[in-house]
Amino acid sequence: MRQILLALLATVALYSAATTSPPPGTPDFKLVQLGEGVWAAIGSDAGKAGANAGFVVGENGVAVIDTFEDPGAAKELLAEIRKLTPLPIRFVINTHYHLDHVNGNDVFAAAGATLLAQRNVHDWMRSENLKWWGDKIKPEMKARVESLKLPDLVYDQGVDLYLGSRKLEVHSYPGHTGGDSIVYVHDAGVVFCGDLFWNRNIPNLTDATTDAWLKTLDTLVGYGAGKFVPGHGEPGTALDVKGFRRYLIDLRAAVGKAQAAGKNGDALVQAVLPELQAKYGGWELFQEFGKSNIQQTSEELAGTKRVPKPAASTASSEPQVPYLPLRVKIGEKAPDFSLPGADGKIVRLSSLAGRKVLLDFYEGFW
Ligand SMILES: [Zn+2]
């Protein structure tokens, strides 16, 4: 998040003391144990981690959830895991494509892990991550983004992983980017939510679809788990997830009300900001994301928001139905409601229900 924040803030020349380099020796994250072999790595605001990560130790290996914003922090996480267990790092799950969750992928790939993510993460990681800097991106950062270690294995809806008898359920849900996943450690009652949950932190809504996100949060609460690890902020409970859901509801309602009053653009932001600040001004990142949350939600409600789209080749999971080519001679009445196919065979129109037909008018148009 620091890299993303720095990029976003630098673009609007709003550099603040809080976003300068951390003092040397600042820890990048703290480890919090949430169950037997279940650890959250909570990124510190001042450190290089930029977001939360986590890991689960099973009978025959370790699964890591997200890899931070900086490879240095990822190396520290790997070192911490090595202090706890000699078991191999078998899997890394990227909860979404944002840089603050994937930039240490190469560290864990080098340690032998198989990287998994929802299909769109693979499509977006090296392209959508460039947008944080716009045309101000430095060549070395562009090169880094374009060489990020991609997932080795992708899924659409989810996948179950086994570390011996320990089962991890990975499920993909919409809302934050359109390619987010959670990792549910069933036997410990812990859900690693990635950025589908921000605990007392104002979210990054750049890619968000908040109406779908509300349904996703209902689903997460419905897991009945005791602990929810957010992408940003401290581990929380279902109550905290509901608190975050309330933020999105309040944001949408306030923006909708201002739109109904005829406001837009900066006037709308200024109209909504005090109401939002009164209730959520104490949350982390309010200064950084409060205004853009209003702006982006306004675009979403107006139907003008740009969100990342799945690559064309994977946009539809429907099998491709081949077209049936038919030749139509203009001016000639089709006898018996049938037409000659391109292969010369006569096709009865009544046999075409539900089929895609490619008509080839070969004597011009009327
Ligand atoms: Zn994040």
Image (cartoon, rainbow, N blue to C red):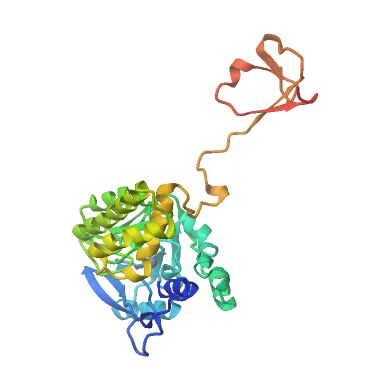
Residue closer to the observer: 93 or 218: 218
Residue at image position (22%, 60%) is: 240
Asked if residue 245 shows in the view, the reply is: yes
Residue 58 image position (x, y, % from top left): 30, 66
315 displayed left or right of 243: right
**In percent of the image, x 33 and y 86: which residue is there?**
26
The N terminus: image quadrant: bottom left
* Image quadrant where one finds the C terminus: top right
Q: In this view, does 321 lie to the left or right of 234?
A: right
- Name the residue nearer the viewer: 23 or 292: 292
Q: Position of residue 232 (x, y in %)?
A: 32, 68
Residue extending furthest top? 336
Q: Give residue 259's position: percent from left, percent from top.
A: 37, 49
Q: Ligand 1 lies in which image quarter? A: bottom left
Residue at x 28% of width, y 52% of height: 249
Q: Quadrant of residue 365?
A: top right
Q: Position of residue 305 (x, y in %)?
A: 46, 52
Of all residues, the one furthest to the right in this rendering is: 363
Q: Is residue 130 above or below residue 297?
A: below
Q: In this view, does 178 lie to the left or right of 232?
A: right
